[in-house]
Image (cartoon, helix red, strand yellow):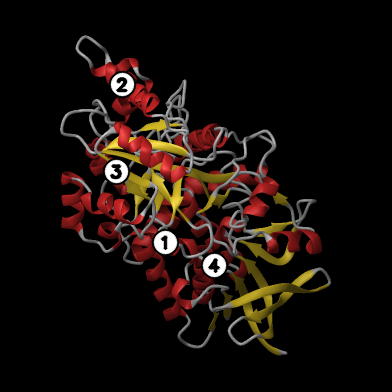
Amino acid sequence: MTSSQSDVLVIGGGLAGIVTALECLRAGKRVTVVDRDTPERFGGLALWAFGGMALVGTPLQARAKIPDSPERALADWIRFGELGDHEHWPLAWARLYVERSRPDVYDWLTRHGLKFMPAVNLVERGRHGDGNSVARYHIVWGTSRHMTLTLIAALREAGNDGRLTLLHRHRVLDLETEGGRPVGARVMDESAGRELRLGASTVVLAMGGINGSHEEARRNWPKERPLPATMLNGAHPFADGRLHHWTADRLGANITHAGEMWNYAAGIPHPFPHFPGHGLSLIPCKSALWLNHRGERIGPEPLVTGFDTHWLCQRVAEQEKPWTWQLLNRRIALKEFAVSGAEHNPRIRDRQFLRFVKETLLGNARLVDQMAREAPQFIVADTLAELATRMNALSGSSDMRPDVLQATVDAFDAHFAPGATPEDDEQVRRILEARKWKPDSLRTCKPAPIQQRGAGPFIAIQTQLITRKSLGGLQTDLQSRVLDTDGAPIDGLYCVGEAAGFGGGGASGKRSLEGTFLPGCILTAQAAARHISGR
């Protein structure tokens, strides 16, 4: 069996693994990175993500006169995540995040030449104002893809003296231990079909979360929460929890908050899937009516995105059928329709500023028309009756009765009749609240009837719940050392990023303020590298 030796073995080629390797190389260490995917997909989910980050106390916030502070952010975080006083390490990581996201994420990335878009967005406000109290969602110019490629280039430069070994298409079979301490790993070279032994004085687990495996997600799903019959996969299929269980069973590591996940309520199958079950996460239009399989508006509190994603997912999961419908018109779609991730945001991804401004002001007809061509779940029709017929054809049922669909739309539109008060509708009130924030007003329509003259044709989008990120994982201390069930660090073993629940085995609690994931990868990786290097 071929063997090699390095100072640090990083298992996983996502953002957390890349940053750990980069900082260890800069500290003079010899580093081996094992990545199960192909060289083209080096970077994991970060290579495809949109690039939104919750950051506290940045120059962009100061310029917009946003009164943020670590104390304010921590209060929002604990309240929204429902973190209890007994959750020592998640609370410690939450505190570290809000205190260090400015210098260790924002400033660190800008030193690598990366920039952020000027508008700071207000997301996850909470249904009752219990989420983000101020705007702190920053978007990387170039999306997360540009950031990841920039850091990969920095990684290669830092290791161009021969201290970096990158192994793609290599799968870890198990860790090797001596006296209960990891001393390397046994891996399979899936290209050559041979085993290798990789020795290292330190092992860093950066293999992602657990809900890339639907079996694992279902096994950990909280029993008190509704579980849909089917789901799409927006995670990574290699993030299957196998190494989590190996370290727990063999080394006594502590897995916590395994049932907490950051999923999305409105996914569609990827028109060109990268793996079985691959889904796209839509950013639902605030002005769309969210309907059940019969065409009735889900209520009594209407579903509106941007306030509480955790709650939206539970409402969708409890529906009688595993799909719901977004009903809108072209006027709404042009201004509000979006797909999460770098792939469907080329203006931001490719840093085409003038084209981005044009689409923001005039409407994103390119994306709307693309989805109408490529996605069967995106249905367009001139009349509601025709729309209902096509919705039934797609679902293979007769659930959608044209008269019910018509009555649903008429009931909403009645709020805009002469003498009526649109604000009587809770969805309209939430839209008006969102439009008070200028960046939201640019991409949220002024409330109007769905059947408004000249606003057509009608559009219906069949959506279902899509998995995304694990909020739980291996419990770690503030140095990213893996802790055993007694709370003691396991010598020589670290865990970073999603594999560690973005710090402490579940720093977010039950809900995230959104955008805490990429920074969580960076912060946990930096902590591990500092401790490994003795800095």
Q: Is residue 167 left or right of residue 4?
A: left
Q: Callout 4 environment at 10 Å: few (<14), some (14 to 19), or many (20+)?
A: many
Specify which label sits upstream in the sequence, 1 or 3. Answer: 1
Label 4: which residue? Answer: 17
Whole-angstrom CA distance, mark 3 to mark 4, is 43 Å
Q: Report which quarter residue 125 is drawn in.
A: top left
Farthest-out residue, top: 419
Q: Callout 2 environment at 10 Å: few (<14), some (14 to 19), or many (20+)?
A: some
Q: Which mark is residue 89?
A: none
x and y percentages locating residue 228 in the rendered image: 59, 41
Specify which label sits upstream in the sequence, 2 or 1. Answer: 1
Label 3: which residue? Answer: 380
Whole-angstrom CA distance, mark 2 to mark 3, is 19 Å
Q: Secondary structure at mark 4?
A: helix
Report whether residue 91 is seen. Answer: yes
Q: Is residue 37 above or below residue 72?
A: below
Callout 3 touching callout 4 (CB < 8 Å):
no
Residue at the spot 35% in from the left edge and 65% down from the top edge: 146
Q: Secondary structure at mark 3?
A: strand
Label 2: which residue? Answer: 410
Specify which label sits upstream in the sequence, 1 or 4. Answer: 4
Specify which label sits upstream in the sequence, 2 or 4. Answer: 4
x and y percentages locating residue 76 in the rendered image: 48, 34
